[in-house]
Image: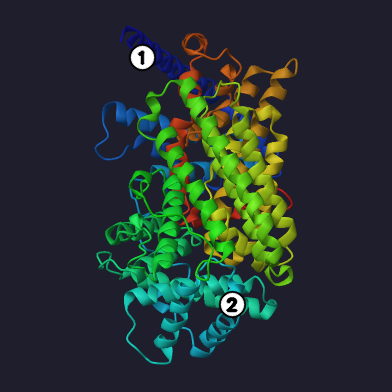
Amino acid sequence: MVVNRTLSETKIDRIESRLASIEQLLRQSSATLSSAVTESVYDSPHEISHHEVNSTKPLGASGDHATQVSAAGDVGVQAESIAAKQTLEQTVDQDPILQQDPQLRNALSSLRRIVDCVQSDVDESTTVKPLSKDVSQARLPDWEEVRLILERVEGDKAAIGGWLWPALLDDFCRKCRAMYEQDQKTTPTDKILVYSVMSNICCQFSGTDGAKAADSSQELSRTCSCLLLQALDTFPMLSPSSLTTAEALMVAASTTIGMCKPSLSWSLSCAAAQMCRALGYNRLQHNNSRPDPLLCRKALLFWSVYTLDRNTSLRLGRSPALQDYDIRTPMLTPDDDAPPATVNMIRFWVECGRVQGKISTQLYGPEASSLDPDKRARLAESLADELEEIHQRKTKAMSDIIPHFNRRRDEMNVDFMVHGDDVMHYSNLTLALYAIPTNHPNRFRALEAARKCLSLSRDVSRNHLHNVHAWKVYCHWVLLHTPLTPFTGIFCNIIVNPQESQQDINLLEDFVSSIQPARRLSEGIEKYYQLCAIFVQVAQAYVRAKTAQQDLGNKSGIDVFKTNNLQPIIGEFDHHLSTLGFNGPEAGLNMHEPYGDDAALKSFADTDPDFYLFGMTNLLDRYPNDLSIQELLEQDLVQLDNASFGLFGNESQGT
C-alpha cells in the first residue's frame, strides 16, 4: 500500500512537472511565433490561411474568440483543461512548419478526428444502417436476374466453394424460387436467408465472371446486401428458436462482416448461438435406437456458429456466447452432407476457435491483469505453440484434399482457402504473443507474426490484382474477418522506434495500397481502406517530424527555438496516439532493461515524466483501444479527410 501510494504521488508530481513544461513550451512558442510566421508565410509561395489549416472550424469563429468561450457548465479545472487544449491546438495550427507541410497538417487533422470518433459518447455501432444506397429505395431483383443465378448454382453446387453445406443450399434454392415463382408470402427468416446467400454467391461469381458479367453480379450482390439490412431492421429478435432461423442468422452474421458491421454480426451470431443452446445443438449425440436424419445438418450449424461466435467475440473484446465446458457435440466426419473440404475447413476453424476463446478470456479477460508477468508470458507462448500445431495439422490435411479440386475452376477458392487461413493463423498468433510483457526477451515474436501476417496478404494480392472482383472476394472473406492487431502492432512499433521504421512503413504502405483497387466495389472495403490509410499517413508524418527534429538538434549553431517549433506538433501527435493506446518513443526506453519485478520498479523511479503518460501502457491497456478502432469501421468515415488518402506508396490521388 505504501509503495502504491508513493508511486501515485510520484506520478502526480511528474504529471505536474510535465504540465509546467508544456506551459513553458507554449510561452517559448508564443515568443517566437510572430517572427516565425511572418518569415515563413511571406517568403513562401504557398501561403495558407489559418482556416485552411484547420478546416473543421467554421469560418465565422476566430481562434481568439474560440479560446475565450468554454462549453456551458464547464467550470474550474474542467474549464481550464478545455482552454488549455484549445490554446495548444491553436498554437499547433498556426505553426509555420504545419503551414509549409500539407502532409503533416492533414495527418494531424485526421488523427484528431479519429480520436473524436473513438471518444464519442454516441454509440451507434449496433444500429442497422443502410449502405451508400438507400435501403428503402433498393429494388427487388428481377426474376430473370435471380433465375440465372439459381440455374448456375443448381447446375454446379460445388462452384460456390463448400462454404454452404448441401442441405442449406437446397433450402436457399427452394425458398428463392418460392419467393418469385409461387408468389408465396415470404417470412422474415426466409428473406434473411435468401438475401444473405444471394449476396455472397453473387459476390463470389463476380470474381470468376468476365468484365460485364462481373459488374452485373457485383450490382446484384450490393442490392441484396441492402435488402438484407432492410430485412434485419424489421426482424423480431425474439423469434422462436428453430433450425432454419438459426441457419439464416448464421449466414447473415457472416455476410454483415463483409459489410464492415462487426457489432451487428456479433449480435446476430449471439442470437444464433442462443437458439442452438435452446435447441440442444451444443449437446448432440448419436442415438442408434432413434437415429436423427438431421444430425449432421445440426452439427454443421452448431460448429459454424461456434467459429463465428469465437471470431467476432475476439475481435470486439467480448466473452464468447458458447463456452467449451457446455459442449458435448461430436466433431464432424466427411459424408454426403458434409464434403471433406468443408469438414476440414470447419475443423480447423473450430480448433482455432477454442484457442481464440482462451486468448480472449485468459490473456485479455478481467482476471488477466492480476497474472504474474512471467506466468502471462508463459501462457501466451503456450497458446501460440498450440496455434502452430493446429496450423501444421491443417496444412497436412489440405495437402491431401487440394488435388481433388478442379484447379482451373476452383483456383480462386483454393487459393483463398489456403492463404486466407494462413493470414487468419498469423493474426491469431499476433494477438496471443502481444500479451507477452513489453520488456520480455520473447516479445519480438509478436512483431514477427504481425509482419508475416501483412506480408502474406500483400503477396496474395499480387496473384489476384489483375482481377479486381476476385481480390474484393478475398478482402471480404479474409481481411474483414481478421483482427486489426497485426496492423496496429506494426504501427505501434513505428511510433516507438521512428528512427528504425522504414521497412515497417513500406510494409504498411504496400498492404494498404493492395486494398486500394477494391475500394470502389465495396463500402466495407472502402471503410477498411480509409481507416488503415489514415494510420499510414500518420506514421509517415510522425516519423518525418521526429527525423526533422533530430536533424535540427544534431546541427551545430541551430537555435533551440527552431527545434522547439516542432515540439508542439510532435506533442499533439503523442497526445492523440496515447489516447488511442499507442505509446510514444519514450515507451521504448526500458525495452531492454532486465526483466522482473525489481527492474520494473526501478524503471518507474528512473524514467522521465513522459514515462507515466506513454511508457506504462501494455496491450492489456491498448487492446480495448484496438477494439474502439475496430468499431470505427462501423461509423461514417467520409469525414476523415478523404482528400488526403492518396499521399503514400505508389497510389495516385484518384481511385
The amino acid type of the residue labelled 1 equals Ser
Picture disc at residue 32: none
- Quarter containing the C terminus: bottom right
Rendering quarter of residue 398: bottom right
Q: Is residue 50 above or below residue 96?
A: below
Q: Tag 2: residue type?
A: Ser
Residue at left offset 40%, top offset 69%: 229
Residue at which label 2 appears = 217
In front: 178, or 654?
Answer: 178
Indicate the position of residue 597 as horizontal and vertical percent values.
47, 12
| Quarter containing the N terminus | top left
State left or right for residue 287 relative to residue 393.
left
Residue at figure coordinates x 44%, y 57% from the top left:
303
Query: How far, Cα to Cα, is label 1 from label 2?
Result: 61 Å
Q: Which residue is mark 1?
A: 8
Question: How far across and how far down the image is residue 223, in percent?
Answer: 49, 76
Left or right, residue 198 beside residue 545: left
Find numbered disc 2 in the image and state the secondary structure of the residue it sits on.
Answer: helix
> For numbered disc 1, what is the local secondary structure?
helix
Identify the residue at image location x=53%, y=29%: 583
